[in-house]
Image (cartoon, grey):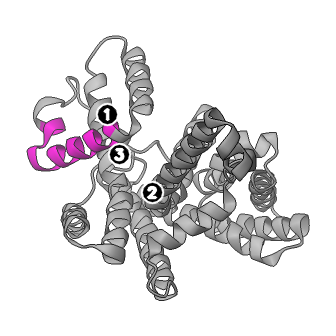
Amino acid sequence: MTRPSSIAVVAGALGALLLVAALRQSVLGVMVGSMLSPLPLAMVVFSLGSAYLPVAVVSGVVTVAVMTGSFPLAGMYLAVDAAPVAILSRLGLAALTAAGKPVSGAAVGRTVCWLVLVAFAAMVVALAMMAAGTEGTGIEATLRARLNEMMPAVPAAATAPEALSQAPTVTGAGLDFAAARAEMVRAMAGLLPGVAAWDWCLRAILSAGLGQMMLMKMNLALWPTPAYRGFAAPQWFFALFGATAVAAAVLKDDAGFIAGNAAAILSLPLVLQGLAVVHSAAARVKHRLAWLAGFYVLALVTAGISSVMLVGLGVMDNFLQIRVRYLAPRTGGE
């Protein structure tokens, strides 16, 4: 076995161990594996090339199967770690075409859009299949029922007949808890499919970006760092997002639920384009890192509002060319 093949085998096993740790809810799994288990696979692609990805994936599948004794979990590894990294490995082909120059932001945007489209298709198919098996109850109602089964119930002491008649304070607390729990379940059911698709994409995107940064620090990167600040989704993707958003606003019941969650996952590249505009603007001011740190803290605190604003900024950049007209680097380059 060659040295690169050995490295790929070890990397695949390490990524699989991180995923198993996340599934078992260990400290390491919660802190690292839950978001970055695809990182070793991404580092294989960006240091050794896409040709070694199958070696790492086979090693990961075997490791999961041996560690858990479950072939379905090995299949889960293929779905949640190997598949998205394989899609992002298209950046390697773009890097070869660039011939030693950084991959353009447009090429990065196209690759991310393909990743999102796979998540979009998988989510729509899964929800459509669920709709066919709900027997008229509806997808959202079915999800709420399943979440109700998994979440802790209202404390029995707060809803027992004795408590209701003898302890008005406890009764109020029990009713408040039940109402808050019902509202939480309703909100989670409405967001769950889109959030799951976002998570599937973001784990791979974060792993690819972090892996490339680490490899550059170690002088092991096979290709230059892509021009992330030039990130741009293709025009047709904006049309697809717009059509899906209109469908989400017009359609009702299961069709509207599916369209709404589809629009949520399709918004991811637009959010990234909005972030590219923010980073381009930050590059023109002093204390760039401090400004970006403050921006990300604020964005995390107001995640819902900031996501909508970033989508709007991405759409504006597509039609008004904000970065080209107003934020072009003073001295050229990224």
Q: CA distance from mark 2 to mark 3?
A: 20 Å
Relative to 299, residue 103 above or below: below
Q: Which residue is mark 2?
A: 191
Q: Which residue is found at the position 54% from the left and 59% from the top?
A: 200
Q: Secondary structure at mark 2?
A: helix
From the viewer's perspective, tell me whether residue 174 is left or right of residue 29: left
Q: Quadrant of residue 273?
A: top left
Percent position (x, y) of residue 146?
61, 68
Q: Are marks 1 and 2 in contact (CB under 8 Å)?
A: no
Percent position (x, y) of residue 177?
59, 43
- Name the amino acid, label 1: Glu
Q: Earlier in the sequence, mark 1 or mark 2?
A: 2
Q: Secondary structure at mark 1?
A: loop
The kind of secondary structure the magenta stretch mainly shows is helix
Q: Secondary structure at mark 3?
A: helix
Q: Which residue is mark 1?
A: 334
- Name the amino acid, label 2: Leu
Q: Report whether residue 129 is seen.
A: yes
Q: What's drawn in magenta, residue-wise? A: 305-324
Q: Are marks 1 and 3 in contact (CB under 8 Å)?
A: no
Find residue 272 and name its label. 3
